[in-house]
Image (spheres, grey):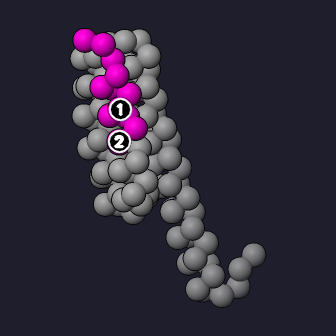
């Protein structure tokens, strides 16, 4: 067990940060999965709607510092390609 006030505070901060990152990691995976599922089903309208939500949420995660800007751009670009490949 930590004895210094600073280490006790760091333990608290780490616990909060871990919980927050777990939430964002799960949310990120589910967002990508929803777009992927809609594209695999061949439903263009649902895929486009899911992509709109994904694009907004992924860029919001960038502003929160969860992922880097370039990572978000790569993910969004690949999701967009998947959605555009669906035959109308």
Residue 39 location, quadrant: top left
Q: Is residue 7 magenta?
A: no
Q: Is residue 16 left or right of residue 34?
A: right
- Image quarter where the C terminus lies is top left
The segment highlighted magenta reads 76-88
Front residue (pair 64, 11): 64
The N terminus - image quarter:
bottom right
- Identify residue for label 2: 77
Q: Secondary structure at mark 2?
A: helix
Q: Position of residue 34 (x, y in %)?
A: 41, 26
Residue at x-position 49% and y-position 38%: 29
Looking at the image, residue 58 sits to the left or right of residue 32; the answer is: left
Tell me where residue 19 appears, x and y as whole percent.
Answer: 53, 54
Tell me the element at label 1: helix
How far apart marks 1 and 2 lie (CA) works out to 6 Å
Q: Which mark is residue 81?
A: 1
In the image, what residue occupies the spot 71% across and 80% down? 2
Q: Does 14 sit above or below residue 30?
A: below
């Amino acid at each position: 067990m930590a004895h210094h006030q600073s280490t006790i505070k760091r333990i608290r901060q780490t616990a909060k940060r871990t919980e927050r990152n777990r939430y964002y990691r799960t949310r990120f995976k589910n967002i990508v999965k929803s777009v992927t599922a809609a594209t695999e089903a061949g439903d263009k309208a649902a895929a486009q709607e899911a992509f709109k939500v994904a694009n907004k949420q992924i860029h919001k995660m960038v502003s929160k510092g969860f992922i880097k800007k370039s990572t978000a751009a790569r993910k969004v670009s690949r999701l967009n390609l998947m959605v555009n490949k669906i035959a109308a």
